[in-house]
Image: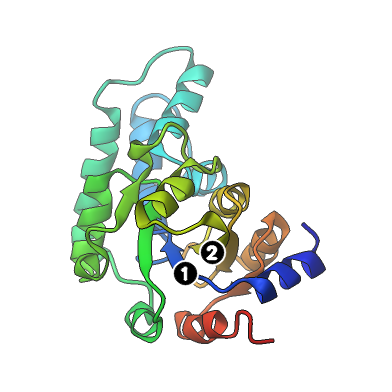
């Protein structure tokens, strides 16, 4: 969709539900997760850096990433490979995970109902949100890619979240930090805002999110309530 067209759609949207991605949006976790994923893959004979994991798998589910790597290796990774990755992730989370700066202020300022839709498994989502004190803000409206057939960039997870929350997809606004997430939102018939204020984001992240179809990009969560309030007001 062209930029002018996206702006018009946003102007016409009165959101009834805000769908938040978790990693990189609610919690500043992507650097940690990419590092743990890369180190575990390397131990299993697939040398890869955290930056390469970021480039290839940001926003995608562990299931999708593992299938892709196994196809390249020509062999299966151990059955407990995801558990090994998450064990390392949880160890690093306990030492250094932080909430996204100003996310509490943003959530306090948003009056529209909200939920979480993440590519991570439920244990990872609950661990990270509990670690930073955000779990109770969203529970039980927390949805994982393990609940659908296809993860992001397919629309399944966002459509599932909208169905569970009983809101039409066209009335949903998604907050994402990845190309896969923005692509999934658009495929679901939703509007996406691209957040590029996480520690994993690069100087060109805003441009890449806009190119993927994000209607609005922002780098400070304190901006979000006003950005949402302005929808339909212009």
Counting from the top left corner in percent of width and height, residue 23 is at 39, 58
The residue lying at 39 percent from left, 53 percent from top is: 117
Q: Quarter-wise, where is residue 214 in the image?
A: bottom right
Label 2 neighbourhood size at 10 Å, few (<14), some (14-19), many (20+)?
A: some
Which element carries disc 2, helix, strand or loop? Answer: helix
| Residue that appears at 60% across and 79% down | 231
Residue position marked by numbered label 1 in the rendering? 16
Residue 103: give x, y in percent of width and height.
37, 77
Name the foreground residue: 149 vs 195: 149
From the viewer's perspective, tell me whether residue 227 is left or right of residue 163. Answer: right
Q: CA–CA distance between discs 2 and 1?
A: 5 Å
- Whether residue 150 is visible, yes or no, is yes
The image's colouring method is: rainbow
* Residue at image coords 24%, 35%: 84
Would you place residue 220 above or below residue 161 in this image? Answer: below
Asked if the residue at tag 1 contacts the one at tag 2, i.e. Cβ–Cβ closer than 8 Å, the answer is yes
Q: Is residue 76 above or below residue 45?
A: above
Mark 2 or mark 1: which comes first in sequence? 1
Horizontal arrangement in the rendering, residue 80 relative to residue 10 (left or right) = left
Q: Quadrant of the N terminus?
A: bottom right
Q: Which residue is mark 2?
A: 171
Residue 29 location in percent, x, y?
36, 60
- Percent across and percent down for residue 185 are 56, 53
Between 125 and 93, the one nearer to me in the picture: 125
> How many other residues sit within 10 Å of disc 1, few (<14), some (14-19) or many (≥20)?
some
């Amino acid at each position: 969709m062209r930029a002018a067209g996206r702006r018009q759609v946003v102007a016409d949207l009165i959101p009834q539900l805000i769908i938040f991605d978790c990693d990189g949006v609610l919690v500043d976790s992507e650097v940690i997760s990419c590092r743990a994923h890369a180190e575990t893959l390397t131990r299993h004979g697939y040398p890869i850096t955290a930056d390469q994991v970021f480039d290839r798998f940001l926003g995608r589910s562990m299931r999708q990433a593992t299938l892709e790597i196994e196809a390249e290796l020509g062999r299966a990774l151990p059955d407990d490979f995801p558990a090994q990755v998450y064990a390392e992730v949880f160890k690093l989370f306990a030492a250094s995970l932080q909430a996204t700066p100003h996310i509490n202020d943003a959530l306090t300022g948003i009056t529209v109902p909200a939920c979480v839709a993440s590519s991570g498994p439920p244990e990872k989502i609950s661990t990270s949100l509990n670690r930073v004190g955000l779990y109770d803000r969203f529970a039980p409206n927390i949805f994982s890619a393990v609940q659908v057939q296809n993860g992001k960039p397919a629309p399944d997870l966002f459509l599932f979240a909208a169905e569970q929350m009983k809101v039409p997809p066209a009335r949903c606004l998604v907050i994402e930090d990845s190309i896969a997430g923005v692509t999934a939102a658009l495929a679901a018939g939703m509007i996406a805002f691209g957040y590029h204020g996480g520690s994993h984001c690069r100087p060109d992240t805003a441009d890449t999110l806009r190119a993927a179809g994000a209607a609005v990009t922002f780098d400070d969560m304190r901006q979000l309530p006003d950005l949402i309030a302005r929808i339909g007001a212009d």
